[in-house]
Amino acid sequence: MILIKLGGSIITNKQKPLSPNLKAINNIASKLRKLNESIIVVHGGGSFGHYWSVKYNIHTKPAKYSKKGVSVVKNSMVELNKIILDSFLKNGLSPYCVPPTDFMYGHKVDSKKVKEISRIANSGFAPVSYGDVIWHGAGKFYILSGDRIMGILAKILKPRLAIFVLNVDGVYSSMKTKELLHEIKGKSAIISRVRADVTGGMHRKIVEASSISNTGIDVFLTNVNMPDRIVNAVRNGKFDGTVFRR
């Protein structure tokens, strides 16, 4: 099984609110169709959910946020997810929507529900989950990111490989030099230095990739502009990007 994360900055045009990047979505879907292996896909919010969560000041910490804001964020993620599902269908995949509320209760994970996702994938479907605003209880909500979902699924399902699809080649040793790190092994000291040099979404991906690799799974970060790299990584283990070695 392969676990794949499509970043929000890839599948949407983050400079323009509520605008999907249909070309990128269709291109990725056409490549995923070539994989002769079970896949589970997770996607971010980009200019849909992320845009509204910033506008309404909704964060990962549980709190009583704006009711309208919660509804708008959730509605926008359903809209973006529908676009992803339609593209997958058009490109010959069999997508199966798995909202995070199917396996999350507050901050608690239902491992039995997560394991059902692997059974769905192994039956020929492509389960698709996504980052979303989640009910926490007592009138509180929080943002559960797609990156965090990758960590949750990887820990329970133990995929053969986890892939984060980015709009850059991978992890750079320095944001100034743009020197690509092709391989990071174990609890490398360089991870702390790199994490201190980046912010936002890339920081979260490095944190999750490091955590996933420490559970015994190779994690590959690669550029969406070369989608054949996904196929190459799955088919023959050729990593053109950054790989966090298990």
Image (cartoon, rainbow, N blue to C red):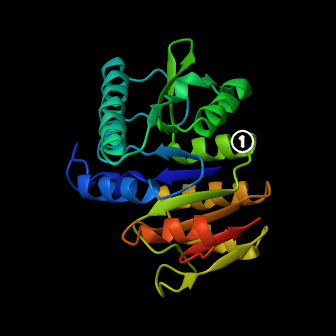
SS under mark 1: helix
Which quadrant would the C terminus be assigned to in this image?
A: bottom right
Percent from the top left, x then y, of residue 200?
A: 47, 57
Q: How many marks?
A: 1
Judging depth in this view, the residue of 188 and 94 nearest the camera is 94
| Image quadrant in which you'd find residue 120 | top right
Residue 159, compared with residue 86, is above or below; it is below
- Which residue occupies 62% across, 72% down? 236
**Other-residue count near label 1 (Cα within 10 Å), few / some / many at <14 / 14–19 / ≥20:** some
- Which residue occupies 60% across, 80% down? 181
Q: Decide if residue 36 is on the left or right side of residue 74.
A: right
- Which residue occupies 56% across, 55% down? 36
- Which residue occupies 53% across, 29% down? 100
Question: On the image, numbered disc 1 is attached to which residue?
Answer: 157
Question: From this viewpoint, is residue 21 visible?
Answer: no
Judging depth in this view, the residue of 85 and 203 nearest the camera is 85
Residue 65, compared with residue 155, is above or below; it is above
Percent from the top left, x then y, of residue 43?
A: 45, 45
Residue type beneath disc 1: Leu
Q: Decide if residue 61 is on the left or right side of residue 68.
A: right
Question: From this viewpoint, is residue 57 visible?
Answer: yes
Percent from the top left, x then y, of residue 217?
A: 74, 58
